[in-house]
Amino acid sequence: MDRWELRMTEAVPSLDRHKQPVKYMLGYLGVGVDGKVALDFHRLRDRAPYLFLSPALNKFYYALMGLRDFFVRSCKNLPEKVELWCDGKQVVLPPQTESFIVLNINSHAGGVELWPEYSMGGGMEG
C-alpha cells in the first residue's frame, strides 16, 4: 500500500508548530469543490441524521449540494487561495481551477477509474 506524507502550512505561519502536524494519507484528498461538498454533506448528516434514511436519499443530498455549488461557485479563484507543491516544486494551477484531488489510488467517486489505461499494478496494459 502506498502511503504519502502531507504537509499543510498556513499563509501566515502560526507560532505554535503543533498546529501544523504532519499528516499521512491513504486514498485521496479533495481540495476545493470536491472537499467542500463532502464537508457540507458530513455537517448536514451530523446536524440532522433523521434526513438520511437510505443510500438513495444520501446520494440525492450529496448531488443537491454539488448542484448548489455549481451555481454558487464557492471555490472560484482557488489558485489565488492555495498553492500546490509536489516533490519540492510548485504546480501551477490553471486560473479557472475550482478543485483538485491529490490521490494515491487509481479510482475516485465510488470506483470511477481516472486512468483506465493503467492496470492496478501501476504498469501500462497492452
Image (spheres, grey):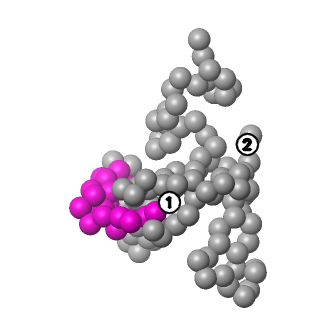
Expressed as whole percent of the image width and height from the top left, the position of residue 16 reads 74, 86
Report if residue 94 is visible in the image: yes
Q: How many marks?
A: 2
Please tell me whether the stretch drawn in magenta is mainly helix, strand or loop. Answer: helix
Which quadrant of the rendered structure holds the C terminus? top right
Q: Name, please, the residue furthest toward the left.
A: 71
Expressed as whole percent of the image width and height from the top left, the position of residue 31 reads 50, 59
Amino acid tagged 1: Val
Image mark for residue 64:
none
Disc 2 versus disc 1: distance between alpha carbons? 20 Å
Classify residue 113 as left or right of residue 57: right
Expressed as whole percent of the image width and height from the top left, the position of residue 124 reads 62, 20
Magenta stretch: give its range. Answer: 58-79
Q: Secondary structure at mark 2?
A: loop
Disc 2: which residue:
2
Classify residue 60 as left or right of residue 40: left
Expressed as whole percent of the image width and height from the top left, the position of residue 112 reads 46, 35
Residue 96's place in the image compared with 77, above or below, is above
Q: Secondary structure at mark 1?
A: strand
User: Which residue occupies 66% across, 54% down?
Assistant: 89
User: Which residue occupies 63% across, 27% down?
Assistant: 120
Disc 1: which residue:
31
- Point out the tag, 2 or 1, that comes first from the N-terminus: 2
Work out whether residue 44 or residue 51 is closer to the camera in this orientation and state it.
44
Q: State the image quarter where residue 66 is shown.
A: bottom left
Q: Is residue 59 magenta?
A: yes
Is the Cβ of the residue at disc 2 closer than 8 Å to that at disc 1? Answer: no
